[in-house]
Image (cartoon, rainbow, N blue to C red):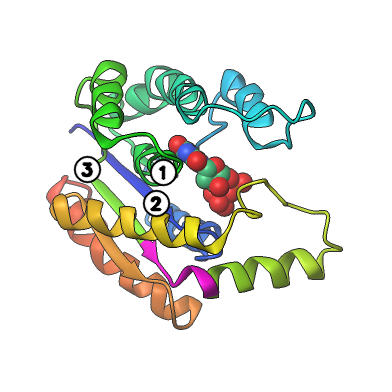
Amino acid sequence: MGGLFITMEGVEGSGKSTQLRLLARRLEALGLPLLVSKEPGGTALGQELRTLLLAPHASGERWCPEAELLLFYADRVQHVATRIRPALEAGQVVLVDRFEDSSRAYQGACGVPEERLEALSHLALGGFRPDLTLILDLDPEEGLRRVTARNGALGGAFRETRFDEAALAFHVDVRQRFQAIAAREPERAVLVPARGTEDTVAEALWAQVAPRLVAAGFRGA
Ligand code: TYD
C-alpha cells in the first residue's frame, strides 16, 4: 500500500483549519495511521521559513514574488523529503494544510507567470503531487469578514499576516486560481463550497475522502 496524500486549500476565512481538525479527528477515530502537517512550517527548517514568510518585514523592502515563491518551495522540498514521502512509504494517510496549489494561487496572484510556477514545480518535486486536494471555496468578501471578526474578537493583534491586509481584489484572484486548478485537474482537485454549517461542510469533505480511502485499500473507511 502506498499511503494516501490529501491536501487542503482555500482562501482566507474559509474555515480550512477547523475543517482540517474535524477531518483529522474522523480519520483518527477510524484508527488509520495518520500524519497531519502544514505549509509553511512542517519541519524545523520550515518553522524558520514560516517566521520569515509571515512576519511583517522590518526592513519594509518589497519582496520579489519569485523570491517569496522560492522560500515557500524551500519549505516544501524539505517537508516532502523528510516527512511526507517517508509517511506515504510507510503506508500512512498524510493530511497537509496547504501545499503547492497555494503557491499556484497566491504567488500566481502576486504576478508569477504560470509557466514559471509549473517549471519550478517540476524542478522541485518532479511530478510528485497529492492524490486528493480539497479546496474550500468561498466568496473572499465573506472570508475576509470572518477573518476580521475573528481578529477583532481577539484584540486585533492576533494572527494578522500581511496576506490578510491585502486588497479584496487579490483574494478574488486567488479564489479564481483555485477554481481554475479544480477545472484543470478534476481527478485530483475538488472544490467544496465552504458556506453552510460546519457539519454540512465536514460531510461534503468526507464524501470526497471516504471513496479515496477505500480505493487506496484502507480498511474501516
Ligand atoms: P497561515 O497562517 O498558515 O494561515 P491559513 O493557512 O489559515 O490561511 O498562513 C499561510 C499564508 O501563506 C496564507 O496567507 C497563504 C500563504 N501561502 C502562500 O502564499 N504560498 C504558499 O505556497 C503557501 C503554502 C502559503
Q: Amino acid at mark 2?
A: Met
Mark 3 residue crowding within 10 angstroms, few (<14) / some (14–19) / many (20+): some
- Quadrant position of residue 209: bottom left
Magenta segment boundaries in residue numbering: 136-141
Q: Residue at x 40, y 57 (%)?
A: 173
**89 and 153: which one is in front?**
153
Q: Residue at x 24, y 23 (%)?
A: 119
Mark 1 within 8 Å of ligand 1, using the beta carbon: yes
Q: Which residue is mark 2?
A: 8
Which type of secondary structure does the marked residue at label 2 adopt? strand
Q: Residue at x 43, y 62 (%)?
A: 172
Q: Is residue 36 left or right of residue 145?
A: left
Q: Position of residue 58 (x, y in %)?
A: 79, 29
Q: Is residue 113 above or below residue 147?
A: above
Quadrant containing the C terminus in the rendered view? bottom left
- Does the magenta portion include 122? no
Q: Which residue is mark 3?
A: 131
Mark 3 vs 1, N-terminal side: 1
Quadrant containing the N terminus in the rendered view? top left
Residue 71 in sight? yes
